[in-house]
Image (tube, coloured by chain):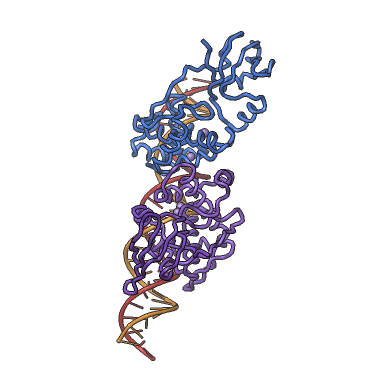
Chain colours: A blue, B purple, C red, D orange
DNA sequence: GTTATTTGTTAGATCAATCTAACTTTATAA
DNA sequence: TTATAAAGTTAGATTGATCTAACAAATAAC
């Protein structure tokens, strides 16, 4: 394993490469709130670990090994979040900070035991997939709520943003994973969508919100 | 808070001062497996934190503030051990290493929740007292089994040594906390004691073992 | 009460992780 | 296509945690 610092860099690298494919040093630096030279020097260490390929002035590419190591850290993070919510009664907006620390604990048994107690969950409290011991995840066929058409009925299955503020916003609207949403109006003007669900029959959600809500079409 | 490193130093300092009163730099260094100069320089930082009083060439003394901070780390360590055993099914010999890492997690809520789930336990799986949120611990009136007289009946209540090897030795003899022991013989020669308990009716325990078994006299 | 041993201190080096300042390369815009 | 801006690199400094080597003080042995 690397240090906690290196693990955090690798995780950021992994997420960026998942979203964007190619990663720049500056993206990494801003994600981690460090200076560009700091990220630059760390990138060289990660190259030495075989986690990414680094060539001067070229975009960074994560290696299969890097992906493997990253997925094990993400596994620990997401199992922790799930454990905190399911076994310890924490709310979904308060678990990330704790998991950010616990994910660095070096003990297979600890996380495997969490996994077992939780019944080998496939998704974390925010709907993100939990890699299994081999790094494999279950891929659902999700789309953004913002891409749904009027009249569609969908299940809220994951969030592509799990910021505390956003989670608290969702709480305030009683929006949680598993809720069935019906698109009852869509504003071409600003991309906002009006949905009905549970005992909310006319909730207007902004484009920004709808972009972060990942839903599954009912069939 | 200090760094993880500093926290580990403080814990060592606390334990040594509990056992010996005065602490030397070399004891600290050997406890932590670092060189004497390393411990020496760290001691100056701890002095700067107000955790101990340092004067050149004089023994170290922990301050009330140092004790307070130390007891909060020990609280986190012992709650974690208890949680691992009681809630996650770990055995008492496998929890220390994990707790050694988890104790550095910075989250009151995390440990308070453990505490609550466990029902505010007063002792950890090895019988060591768990400090409450104010650093207070319950003090039992324990003596070493090696100090018991023939014929006495006592309850095994704590261990003054929790090394893995020792715990595995105890497992092999079905010795666990709460077991009632009757001293049926005592060898003046080597200090070994023969005890009977549960369905063991003649178990010989060496002086070394008996020194690590803390028992409570029945009354 | 000297001498020898142990213990403690200082100095100086190294490595990880960080920064700022200066410079270079690549990308963008005029 | 050259000028400007953005991104990336290098150099050099800092801080925390560690080491070894050299020296000083305190303690123990004789
Ligand atoms: Mn998270
Ligand atoms: Mn982290
Ligand atoms: Mn322990
Ligand atoms: Mn520790």
**Is D30 on the left or on the right of A111, as rendered?**
left
Residue A83 location (% of width, % of height): 50, 36
Does residue A25 show up? Answer: no
Identify the residue shown where x is 64% and y is 17%: A197
Count of numbered badges drawn on the protein: 0
Residue B206 location (% of width, % of height): 34, 65
Identify the residue shown where x is 46% and y is 49%: B99
**Is B33 on the left or on the right of A204, as rendered?**
left
**Quarter of the figure with residue A107:** top left
Closer to us: B171 or A140: B171
Does residue B44 show up? Answer: yes
Identify the residue shown where x is 52% and y is 38%: A33
Q: Work out which quarter of the rendered image holds the N terminus of chain A and state it.
A: top left
Residue B49 location (% of width, % of height): 56, 60
Residue B191 location (% of width, % of height): 35, 71
Identify the residue shown where x is 65% and y is 25%: A174
Relative to A144, does residue A163 appear above or below in the rendering?
A: below
Closer to us: B124 or A212: B124
Relative to A72, does residue D17 appear above or below in the rendering?
A: below
Relative to A166, does residue B54 appear above or below in the rendering?
A: below
Relative to A26, does residue A201 appear above or below in the rendering?
A: above
**Is A85 on the left or on the right of A2, as rendered?**
right
């Amino acid at each position: 394993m690397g240090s906690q610092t290196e693990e955090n860099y690798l995780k950021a690298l992994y997420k960026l490469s998942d979203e964007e494919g190619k990663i720049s040093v500056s993206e990494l630096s801003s994600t981690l709130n460090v200076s560009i030279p700091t990220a630059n020097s760390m990138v060289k260490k990660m190259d030495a670990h075989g986690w990414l390929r680094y060539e001067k002035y070229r975009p960074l590419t994560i290696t299969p090994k890097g992906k493997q190591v990253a997925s094990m850290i993400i596994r620990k993070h997401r199992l922790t979040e799930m454990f905190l919510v399911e076994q310890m009664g924490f709310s979904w907006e308060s678990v990330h900070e704790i998991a950010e620390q616990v994910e660095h604990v070096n003990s297979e048994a600890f996380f495997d035991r969490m996994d077992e107690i939780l019944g080998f969950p496939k998704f974390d409290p925010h709907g993100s997939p939990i890699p299994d011991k081999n790094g494999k995840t279950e891929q659902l066929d999700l789309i953004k709520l913002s891409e749904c058409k009027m009249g569609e009925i969908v299940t809220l299955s994951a969030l592509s943003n799990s910021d505390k503020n956003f989670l608290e916003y969702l709480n305030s609207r009683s929006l949680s994973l598993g809720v069935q949403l019906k698109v009852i109006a869509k504003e071409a003007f600003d991309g906002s969508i009006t949905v009905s669900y549970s005992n909310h029959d006319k909730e207007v959600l902004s484009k920004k919100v709808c972009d972060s809500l990942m839903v599954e079409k009912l069939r």
